[in-house]
Amino acid sequence: MSSRSAEASIKGYNYQFLHTIKDILENERDIDENIVEGIEDLDIVKENGSDLIQYKYHEEQSYQNSKVAKPIALMFKHFLANQKSSSINYKLFIFLNTTELPNITTDRITSILKIKESRKILSDTNTELTIEAIDSYLNDIIIFITKFTWKLTQKYDELENNIISTFESIVGLSNEEANIVYFSNAIKIINDLAIQSDVNNRKITKRVLLSKLNTCKDVLYSSYILREKSFVALKKIVKKRKITLNIKKNSSTHIIHINNTNRNNISNLIIDLVKKFCFKDNRSDLNPLVFIVSSTSIEYQNLKKSLYEYIDQSLILVNDGTEDYNFNINLFNAKPLITKNRAGNKINHTSFNFKLLHEKVYKNHISGIDFSNPSLFIIDSIESDLAALTEKQFYLNGLDNNQILELIGE
């Protein structure tokens, strides 16, 4: 697959998720069941029947019967197997480089089903159906077109703006909240549903979707923003969220959850981050960073060994709460003792520069560990066992060390 076709495939898949969000939000009944990746891309189970919807996105292509052969053949095949169910409707939502779609007629659908790809789909063997076999479906096609509709949809960026505006109106959000938080988190929720193997775990109502979004309104996922935007845009978004959530270096404890100790140059990243906070010649009111590591005991010890090599070279001190080989919670909770410069606004010397802890130790002493106004930055994971620590969460995935340094350190 060429890079261009791969990009088109990814965009088409993303478009499917975007339109899924749009169609769930625009349903007036918030208790209707929506099945992501059900019989079709989205199945909407209503009080009086079901809508089975397929989404297609062909940004640079005009209408041809061949462009709709596969989705229509699949829908027609399902229709043939479920003709007794009069409450199922079939919908094809498609974006094409054209101003209108042709009328749905018996001749049009018959011609589409006679395309070789369609006849392969309709066949129960390895050999496609004959054209004559398609002609024998005339009465079925006549009924099918009473249940089938298609419509041209919005262009990618227009659809994005439509969804953001919908969030603004139905939830009462600012454009920033709708764009930065709800939009990217909605994509994540739909993506998480789509990858579930059990169809029962791919179901959601509009009411539940909005409830989930309200619950994680202070959570940001970098990977779902990067999927739609650039790193420059992500950086601006993170900066705005920090301001909105009152996350400052001098008033919030920045907790870094490390999930991959084998990340390239992880020790360098930790030291570089430390130097952006409680470090010599920085402002004296900056809080020290806290690193909590999820790993095996051996991986954690190897990380500490690597860190100590850098610490010796950089005159950096760590507080890991260890005293005589035992964890001392009072020692870990202590604030750094700082000697300031003559002006009293810069760090000249500090008793420690950052805190380091294994996740297991943290969980064993969770009730006694004290973090002031914590904000959580999760590296290399879209989930965190530390999520209960704070609602202010930033999931940083698909980023290199310099990008992470910019997002957390500035």
Image (cartoon, grey):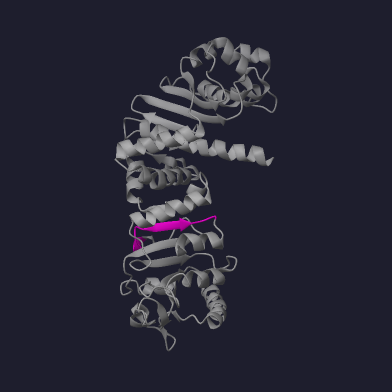
Above or below: residue 135 compared with residue 379: above
Q: What x and y, as percent, mark residue 241?
A: 38, 54
> In the image, residue 370 lies at what x, y percent?
32, 73
Residue 83: tell me if it is visible.
no
Q: Residue at x 59, y 14 (%)?
A: 110
Q: How many marks?
A: 0
Above or below, 193 against 264 in this view is above
Image position of 70 (left or right of 228): right
Estimate the x, y position of residue 32 in percent, counting from the top left.
Answer: 35, 33
Magenta segment boundaries in residue numbering: 388-398
Split into 4 quadrants, where in the image is the N terminus? top right
Whether residue 81 is in magenta: the answer is: no
Q: Is residue 114 left or right of residue 283?
A: right
> Which residue is depicted at the point 56% across and 78% down?
310
Q: Is residue 120 visible?
A: yes
Q: Residue at x 49, y 42 (%)?
A: 194
Looking at the picture, tell me which residue is in the foreground, 41 or 11.
11
Q: Which quarter shows the C terminus? A: bottom left
Q: Is residue 389 magenta?
A: yes
312 or 40, nearer to the observer: 312
Q: Residue furthest front?
A: 343
Give how far across and how far down residue 322 sits, in percent. 42, 83
Considering only vertical position in the picture, is 391 above or below 166?
A: below
Residue at position x 54%, y 83% in the image? 312
Point out the residue furthest to the bottom here. Answer: 324
Which of these two is toward me, 388 or 342? Answer: 342
